[in-house]
Amino acid sequence: MAFRDPALDILWRDLTYAWPLLNIIKLYGSNGDEKHTAHRVKLPALLVPLTPSGWSKFLFYSSRIHTLSVTVDSFSAYTNEILDSLFTELSSRVQGKPVFPSLESLRWEQSGFTSFDESLVITFLSHSAILRCFKMNGRSDPTNTSEALGTILRKLHETVPVLEELSLKGYSDASIEENYNLLTGFQALRVLECSVVSLPTLHFCADLESLTELKVALEKRPSEECRHLCLRDVRSLRVEASLDVALHFLGAVTYPLLTSLEINDGSTKKLQELVPHLKAFSIMFAPNQALRTLRIYLSIRGSADVRLVEIVAPLLELRQLEEVAIDTGRSQDASLDDKDLSTLASSWPNLVALDISLHPGKYEPHIHALAAFARFCPKLRSLKLHSIIVPSDPGPAPAMCHSLRYLDIEYHRLPYGSEFVSRPIREAHFLHKMFPNVAGNANDESNGLNNWKEVNKVWAALRAGEDVQEPEGMNYSCREYITWPWENI
């Protein structure tokens, strides 16, 4: 019993969907009768209010929630019926203590063609005492009007003393323009997310003096009038758009303090279409020595096999980068070999974190190529790769004593055509010689042919100072290791 409350606090702290909460209404708000849905599923009829004991049970759990996501789905009449019942319960207790006293982040999403009802949102806000983040996505709702937005914003001003993060996906520029005074009234707003960017929205972003992080989704190029706007305090910018539209936007406005940039291009393009845009991007940001973090998500098609270095070659000129994430999608093969890893490591010597996600092509790097990061990137703390090739006996590794703390490699493969058997103890010894300071590995399961879970166990023992050696007499079906040309790394 001593651990019950701390355990429940952890379990109920972040609810990415509202069903655990709605199940309490379903359980304690039923009159015991049953009804049939269109799919002939028997469900309890929610026709009675919660009993005092049922409401106490609801409060017992709702008071622990810090993050909550609610989805109103037009294709789930049963869920909406429970939401209506919850709305009735909350509305009848508006004058009492907040039902969600610990709620800091609320995400409200419309799905399907549900008509938007701001009264339910306002009721949730009335029972939130310390809300800091409010996200609302009503993109599919045709009734999202400026009047409804204004009603919610006025309630936010009334109930939320310090709003730090706001998401307004699904609202037009006209709605934002009509509620301009209400929006600019959030003096502590640090993070803003919006879906359509034009002149009114950008003026709103530029006038928020506290704004440090901006997330925008662009469907078309902003107007030429935007060239006179300055996002003077924005340090982190995320753009969801095709590369050409994103580049036009980045070239239109100014951002003197920008240190982190993320571009998410959901469209699929050929390699020859991407490279010119990336070259233009490199030229644009080469003078900006303040940029430290770059994340790019692309989708490539049309080639049997492309090399990752061909894609990111223009970005290698940005030698000041410290955090880099590159995702080329899983629909196109992309090769990354030993020489490519060495090129990436030598081009970005200030790297602190590198994350490469791709669908492996014809070539994959060997475990020995990780030495390039130990040699060229002394500040590297986090490394994530899709796959490496690990010989059954990787041989001795140089004692580099690098300060890497986090390693995540999804797949460990034996050389193609090899009949070798995994030797987790030798692989762990090999990695420990290069990276003795790794605190842990995100991927703790066995993927591919090598037993990565066993490698982690041995590696943890080595980090603890234990002497782990292979048992004598073990018969491995493998050849002797091949001497690796370390001087070429």
Image (cartoon, helix red, strand yellow):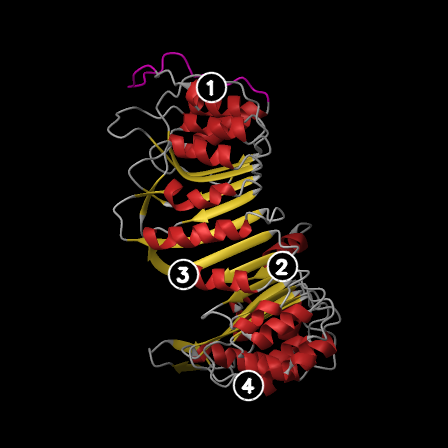
Characterize the magenta stretch by its predominant secondary structure: loop
Upstream in the sequence, badge 3 or badge 2? 2
Q: Looking at the rendered structure, which numbered label has been put on residue 145?
A: 4
CA distance for labels 2 and 1: 45 Å
Against 390, is 188 above or below?
below
- The reply to whether discs 2 and 1 touch (Cβ–Cβ < 8 Å) is no
Residue at left offset 33%, top offset 52%: 272
Query: Could you tell me how far apart the alpha carbons at marks 4 and 1 are, in whole angstroms?
Result: 64 Å
Secondary structure of the residue carrying numbered label 2: loop
* Gap between marks 3 and 2 measured at Cα: 24 Å
Residue 376 appearing in the image: yes
As drawn, is 404 to the left or to the right of 342?
right
Kind of residue at disc 2: Tyr
Residue ID for mark 2 = 255
Whole-percent x and y of residue 293? 57, 48
Which residue has dot 3 on it?
266
- Report the span colored magenta: 465-480
Helix, strand or loop at disc 1?
A: loop
Nearest to viewer (mark 2 / mark 1): 2
Q: Which of the 4 quarters of the picture holds residue 323?
A: top right
Badge 4 crowding class, 10 Å Cα cut-off, few under 14, some 14 to 19, many 20 or more, is some
- Dot 2 or dot 4, earlier in sequence: 4
Q: For residue 112: magenta? A: no
- Residue 193 lies, in percent from the top left, at 57, 67
Query: Which amino acid type is shown beneath numbered disc 1?
Result: Ala
Q: Which mark is residue 397?
A: 1
- Asked whether residue 478 is drawn in magenta, I would say yes
For badge 3, the amino acid type reads: Gly
Residue 242 visible in the snapshot: no
| Image quadrant where one finds the C terminus | top left
